[in-house]
Amino acid sequence: MCGINGILGHIDNVSDRIHQMNDRVLHRGPDAEGIWLCPEAPVAFGHRRLSIIDLSENGAQPMVSASERYVITFNGEIYNYIEIADELTKTDLSLRFRGTSDTELLLEAVERLGMTETLKRIKGMFAFAIYDRKEKYCYIARDRMGEKPLYYGMVGGAFVFASDLASIESLPQFERKIDTKVLGTYFKGGYIPAPFSIYQGIYKLEPGHFLTVKEPFDAWKDDIYWDIRKVAKEGTGNLFKGSFEEASESLEGLIKNSIKGQMISDVPLGAFLSGGIDSSLTVALMQSMSDKPVRTFTIGFEDETYNEAVYAAKTAEHLGCEHTQMYVSKIDILDTIDEIPTAFSEPFADSSQIPTMLVSRMTKEHVTVSLSGDAGDEFFCGYNSYRDVRRGLEILSQKLPVLKGKTRETLGNVIYKAGGNNAFMHKLSVVLRVNTPEKWYRNIREDNLLLDELIRHADAYDDKINTYDDGFLEGAESNLMLMDMLQYLPDDILVKVDRSGMMYSLESRIPLLDRDVMEFAWTLPQEYKYDGKTTKRILKDILYRYVPQEMMDRPKKGFSVPLKTWLTGDELGEWARTLIDEIPDLMGEYIDKKIVDKMWNKLITTGEGDREIWKILMLARWFEVRKVR
């Protein structure tokens, strides 16, 4: 796990510039720094290292291949690198690896297999750039689901890339121009989805994609090597034929294999344990394959509505883990809020970023690598909202049987435009405008009148990020899960996990995002995931072989926080009100302060709208730190 940077093309003082870019990602790689300047072309690679595999100089980067043709700067882990290395040495008897790092494997694999075949073969989380000194072009790739970040764009006539926007911001040639269309998208979800960033002309490489940038490095070609849409379509068209019990056995084996590969580390390793299904399953399988207690970590809240620490402790005790927990104080919260703009280099407003940062900081005091149970909800139908959408549409068709499809949607649009600030008319318009599960799912996320009024002041990139048609797959839940895999999982959940961990130089690994697990999950019949009563049915079936069902039978809480209580309390409420008062100076040209005041008053008087206020606060805090005008 590291931070990578690069400049392709002519730029003044390139050595100093790449060093500046490295400095901005010190937290991603505190163990060592490396810079490579190509002697025959305007190419510079930078690297900050967090040593995980092969701690010797044999793992240092940027790394040059044995033939000296290829050079790489790499962030992430390749979990099946030993297997691929064995295959390469059997087919090429002259190949001798200098060390034991997956970085060297990537170099030699690209040289022998080519870029596309290498990407198809490797399993892991990664973002890397490989320069071919012979052909004078650069490959830049990102993992299948987007666990590792990669930004890119043109700055001062040169093509640049980086793990973090802060590295690009460090370049004096960079003009910090806000992409105003992104703001409308940000306010809807609380994050900025790929391929866009907060800045004009700077993009995120999309998951499963790789770029080819050829000299003179003023243009690029974008290719897809793995597409979750294609995986979903093929999987649901070729369903698993065996029984539920056979599917459960097969899935357990795949997850175990993933965890076994992800437990390889030359530094101390542990796991996050929230007390929920996914993290408990991850820890249970880890412990079943370990001859010593697995180190587990969790945080708790005094508010019992949000506290799962007590359940996590019981699960850890039952499994025989070495457990560490911490209860969050108000001071912890305020300190973490101060660090958010550094951890997240563009606006990000998932409030569970706070507990994720806190548990990451605590975990780093004990280990350098931590496994996580994320992605279970998206791949195994875990969110209650999937069930609610189906029920909502059924109720709507019963209540309004006369209004069908487009007729209902057209009426909803008319009411939306004519309703003004009337809350009832707004809600009615939202209900009427939906005639598919996908539209319902999108609209329930945006159902806030004042926030909707705020969004009207900015465009959005909705036409470019809703990347498949409604009804692409058979079944409402399948389409909603795919929607989340295309946006919410990579651009919210995985951003949160990566940035929170790397803020404290902690590597987070997610076994459920193993390629084989993901592809198998899409072949499972829907009733194996959700049968109308039990969500994540197949994951629970596996877990109950290790943890008694009665220990886990409780309402789903998720990794949420008592945000409403915090924002209406003394310390955090005072901070929020002060920041809101500064909005005209911070970002007055983008945000209407009068609408924000209405939203704040609504929160104080009714307790509604805490998530929307948090989006505004995180945007304002970003502007405050970045000093962008």
Image (spheres, rainbow, N blue to C red):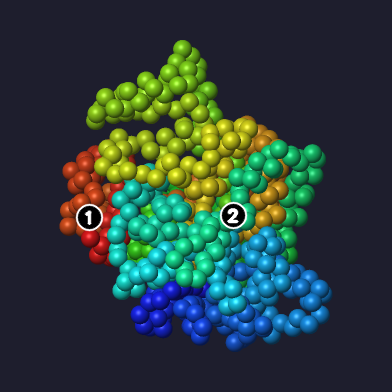
Decide: few, some or many residues near mark 1? Use Cα within 10 Å; few <14, some 14-19, many ≥20: some
For this view, does 116 lie left or right of residue 421?
right
Decide: few, some or many residues near mark 2? Use Cα within 10 Å; few <14, some 14-19, many ≥20: some
Camera-nearest label, 1 or 2: 2
Hey, what amino acid is under mark 1? Met
Hey, what amino acid is under mark 2? Ile
Q: Residue furthest bottom?
A: 57
Q: Which residue is mark 1?
A: 587
Residue 103 position, x and y percent, is 62, 75
Q: Earlier in the sequence, mark 1 or mark 2?
A: 2
Asked if one can make out residue 3 in the rendered structure from this viewpoint, the answer is no
Q: Secondary structure at mark 1?
A: helix
Residue at 47% x, 70% y: name it.
216
The residue closer to the viewer here, 61 or 52, is: 61
Tag shown at residue 187: none
Residue at 49% x, 83% y: name it.
37
Q: Secondary structure at mark 2?
A: strand
Residue at 49% x, 48% y: name it.
488
Residue 113 position, x and y percent, is 71, 68
Residue 454 position, x and y percent, is 27, 41
Determine the image quadrant of residue 142: bottom right
Q: Which residue is mark 2?
A: 224
Determine the image quadrant of residue 229: top right
